Amino acid sequence: MHAVTVNFNPIIELNDDQFYQLCGTNPKVKFERNAKGELIIMLPTGGETGNLNFEIYIDLGIWNRRAKLGVCFDSSTCFHLPQGSDRSPNVAWIEQERWDALTPQQKDKIPPICPDFVVELMSAKESLKFTQEKMKEYRENGVRLGWLINHQNHSVEIYRQEQIVEVLKFPTHLSGENVLPGFVLNLQPIWN
């Protein structure tokens, strides 16, 4: 089990400010919230998954510094999605113009925006079904490109707007396509 879902709605329905306050009051706990308002308590990332996430951050960050097309985010960033959920992908990227359209206050709290690109890197403890549902939710909220990387079985599920999910077995690299032009992620560090 990777996450625990708790439904407090019969007792209290947290508004966005209360959810933000709950997160700030409990900085050692990683919370998400689904569109029904249920709290999802995420377990900490293990060392292996944390290291692999970092490898992806490095590659995306270097590309982004050169391309200067957007803003990168790590797994501690929570986004308030249009359909009402609050999610923290392992890696996220937002086109600069969309990020710049937010107010400083929106950027400072939980940004009310869906990333253009997300990565979810599965750990051995995670449920594939839970992560696939999360990826579908990202796509329904506006993610243009999403990668679900399952390093246990060496596969990648690619989520694109209005397309069926593409599944690749043991790919050597992934292309950022037209969302991240020129970005190529070498998967050898993930598979090794």
Image (cartoon, rainbow, N blue to C red):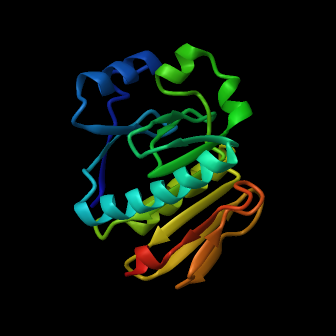
Residue shown at 46%/56% (left/top)?
A: 58
Say whether residue 168 is left or right of residue 190.
right
* Residue 84 occupies quadrant: top right
Give the side of residue 85 with respect to residue 66, left or right.
left
Work out whether residue 95 or residue 149 is closer to the camera in this orientation and state it.
95
| Between 135 and 154, the one nearer to me in the picture | 154
Residue 27 placed where, x, y %?
Answer: 25, 30
Can I make out residue 4 in this image?
yes
From this view, report whether residue 31 is shown above or below residue 106. below
Q: Residue at x 61, y 78 (%)?
A: 167
In this view, 190 is above or below 159 = below
Q: Is residue 13 visible?
A: no
Whole-percent x, y for residue 14 in the image: 40, 21
Give residue 45's position: percent from left, percent from top: 28, 55
Q: Residue at x 70, y 23 (%)?
A: 101
Left of 110 or right of it: where is 68?
Answer: right
